[in-house]
Each structure stands twice: as structure tokens, then as C-alpha cells.
Amino acid sequence: MIRKATKKIKIPINIKIDELLAKYPYLGDILFYEYGLHCVNCIISGFDTLREGAMVHQIEGVEFKKMIAHLEETVNLTENKKK
């Protein structure tokens, strides 16, 4: 069986948090428990982008890049399993 190459899903850093969670709800636990972004359960999630939410919680620079990489890895593993 020949498998199609799967396109890697990239998470835009300027996506609104609530949009991200609507698309990938399973990321909510990662953002909440592993990164302390309690805004996933807050009305602010409709206004703040992922980058802004991270900045409020002092996740910037290399740590922010690691968080994005972790989220993208999770999304790609999860979404590829569905195919």
C-alpha cells in the first residue's frame, strides 16, 4: 500500500486561542496543565492570540518556540492517526 505524504500542520502564532481550541480541543489540556495558560477557560481566549496569551504568562523566546513545536507535534500525531 502506498501512503500519501502527509502535509505538516503548522500552528499560526497569531491564531486566537478560542479558534485554536475549536479546531484542536485536545490542546486545551496541554496549554492549561503544561504551560499554565489558564486563559483557555476564560473569555479572554476569544480576544488573545496564542502569542499574546503566552506573553502574559512569561512564555517567550525559546520557551515559546518549544511550546509551539510541542503543540504542532501533538496536532500532527493526532491528526495523522485519524487518517
Image (spheres, helix red, strand yellow):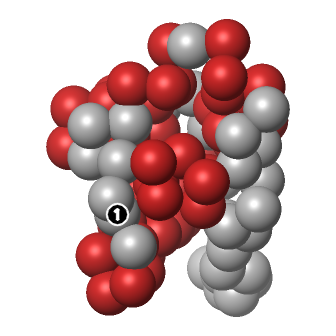
Three-letter amino acid code at disc 1? Ile
Q: Which of 73 and 65 is in front in this view?
A: 65
Question: Residue 20's x, y, as percent?
Answer: 69, 41
- Residue drawn at (51%, 25%) of the image: 40
Placement of the N terminus among the 4 image quadrants: bottom right
Q: What element carries label 1?
A: loop
Tally the marks: 1
Picture layout, residue 43 above or below residue 30? above
Picture layout, residue 11 above or below residue 44? below
Residue 59 visible to an observer of this rendering: yes
- Residue drawn at (61%, 54%) of the image: 52
Q: Which of 49 and 30 is in front in this view?
A: 49
Question: Residue 32's x, y, as percent?
Answer: 32, 30
In this rendering, position of residue 61 left or right of residue 21: left
Residue 34, by quadrant, is top left
- Residue at the outermost left position: 34
Question: Residue 63's x, y, as percent?
Answer: 29, 76
Residue 37, by quadrant, is top left
Residue 77 visible to an observer of this rendering: no
Q: Nearer the viewer, residue 57 or 45?
A: 57
Picture layout, residue 34 above or below residue 62? above
Question: Residue 77's x, y, as percent?
Answer: 44, 61
**Label 1: which residue?**
59
In this rendering, position of residue 82 left or right of residue 68: right
- Residue drawn at (39%, 73%) of the image: 60
In this rendering, position of residue 56 left or right of residue 21: left
- Residue drawn at (26%, 46%) of the image: 35
Q: How crowded is mark 1: few (under 14 residues within 10 Å), some or many (20 or more)?
A: some
